Image (cartoon, helix red, strand yellow):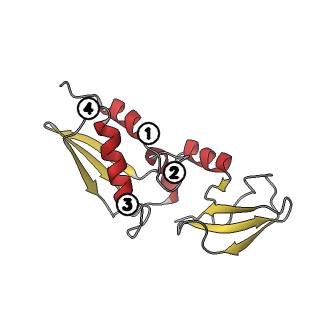
Amino acid sequence: MVKPEIAQIWDWLDAVPDPEIPVISLVDLGIIRDVTWEGDMLNVTVTPTYSGCPATTQINEDILAGLAANGLTNVTLKRQLSPAWTTDWLTEKGAASLEKFGIAPPAKGVPARCPNCHGTDLEKSSQFGSTPCKALWKCRSCLEPFDYFKCI
């Protein structure tokens, strides 16, 4: 088998959705940090959103399955905790996907606007939302609750 180019592998990885927020890819989430060939071994470096992320095992399985579906089975996953993941690694495409899905993308400290009506009169309902990396907010304009992807 001819080794695929790294750019092609990044494209394949961009098709692997986050298991907790399937509207965003692992690449757009910014947790896939590096992809390199070392001889015939493909190395994929992954930084979880936080060290205790409950989706880590599923993410690793999904990466391996996504690459295997494209003929790559000689893969090593490397977990990199430093530097720690930050919401700054989220791509613009990823942030737009979150908002379109109804999750306010990270902003410095508080959501910039409601992902449903784009109103700015907001209040925090709970520090934790549907997953530990999100908080629950409510829009006072449309009265809809929404998740806010916390800045880390």
Residue 26 in the figure: left or right of residue 42: right
- Give how far across and how far down residue 142 sits, in percent: 85, 58
Q: Residue at x 80, y 52 (%)?
A: 117
Q: Residue furthest left?
A: 39
Q: Which residue is drawn at 62% across and 55% down?
A: 105
Q: Distance between the residues labelled 3 and 4?
A: 23 Å
Name the residue carrying label 3: 56
**Mark 2 packing: few (<14 Cα in 10 Å), some, or many (20+)?**
some
Query: Mark number for residue 90?
Result: 2
- The answer to which of marks 3 and 4 sits earlier in the sequence is 3
**Mark 1 packing: few (<14 Cα in 10 Å), some, or many (20+)?**
some
Q: Which residue is drawn at 22% across and 39% down?
A: 73
Query: Where is residue 140, by image quadrant?
Result: bottom right
Q: Is residue 83 above or below residue 19?
A: below
Q: How far apart are marks 2 and 1 (CA)?
A: 13 Å
Name the residue carrying label 1: 14
Q: How far apart are marks 3 and 1 (CA)?
A: 17 Å
Mark closer to the observer (4, 2): 4
Q: Which residue lies furthest to the right in this view?
A: 141
Query: Mark number for residue 71?
Result: 4
Q: Is residue 124 above or below residue 81?
A: below
Residue 38 in the figure: left or right of residue 12: left
Say what amino acid the circle numbered 4 marks: Gly
**Mark 3 packing: few (<14 Cα in 10 Å), some, or many (20+)?**
some
Depth check: give the residue in front, 94 or 15: 15
- Give how far across and how far down residue 102 sits, in percent: 68, 52
Element at label 3 = helix
Say what amino acid the circle numbered 3 marks: Thr
Element at label 2 = loop
Residue 6 in the figure: left or right of residue 15: left
